[in-house]
Image (cartoon, helix red, strand yellow):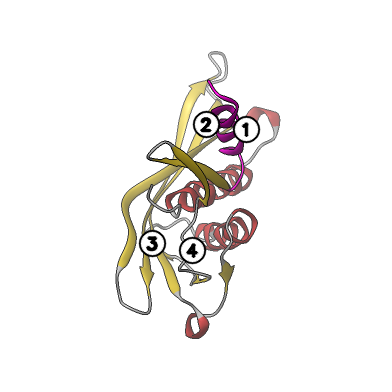
Amino acid sequence: MSRVGIACVLMLLLPGGCVSHGGSYHWSSLYRQDISTVAVPLFSSKDYHRGVEFQVSDALVKKIEEFTPYKVVPRERADTILEGEIVAVRPLTVTLDPHTATPQEQQYTIVVNFTWKNLHDGKVLVNRRDFEQTSNYYPTLGEGQYVAAQTAAERLALAIVHEMEAPW
């Protein structure tokens, strides 16, 4: 592999990438250059687990600000809007203690539908249904559902941010 190819592979770890066009290379952002702002209203929820919509929305705003060039602003000043709905929250027992039948390992899954839309022309940029993320937690070690929900919300937010990358 050439030095340029090796440099491109290493640079893929950064928020930009190296793209080859007809044998020549150039640097390009992983994110759309025609967008600078995103509105992120509070996700709605169809599930009875309350508070998860706040965790997901808050984590999403933080991950957008941390990992993308986009700025989160109110809808009236935004180029795009990222709206979503929590479809399901599923706690699941993975393993039980054979002597006491108490949960040892549990999973916490958050399932969402979300749409990222350009507010200037109405074009849908990303539309995902039944998009989910899971977090494991261990009640016998003192971990509760709140910790699992927060971890799952942060993982979900990061996965949504990855969906916001520009198509190559």
Residue hosting label 2: 106
Instruction: Report the span colored magenta.
Output: 1-15
Asked if labels 3 and 2 touch by Cβ distance under 8 angstroms, the answer is no
Residue at image point 37% right, 80% down: 120
Does residue 136 lie above or below 163 as drawn?
above
Residue 130, horizontal then vertical, whole percent? 32, 48
Q: Earlier in the sequence, mark 2 or mark 1?
A: 2
* Badge nearest the viewer, 4 or 1: 4
In the image, what residue type sits under mark 1? Pro
Q: Earlier in the sequence, mark 2 or mark 3?
A: 3
Asked if labels 1 and 2 touch by Cβ distance under 8 angstroms, the answer is yes
Q: Earlier in the sequence, mark 3 or mark 4?
A: 4
Circle 1 SS class: helix
Residue at image point 55% right, 24% down: 2
Residue hosting label 3: 85
In the image, what residue type sits under mark 2? Gln
**Magenta run includes residue 13:** yes
In the image, what residue type sits under mark 4? Gln
Residue hosting label 1: 139
- Give the alpha-carbon distance from disc 3 to disc 4, as whole Å: 27 Å
- Give the alpha-carbon distance from disc 2 to disc 1, as whole Å: 8 Å
- Give the alpha-carbon distance from disc 2 to disc 3, as whole Å: 24 Å
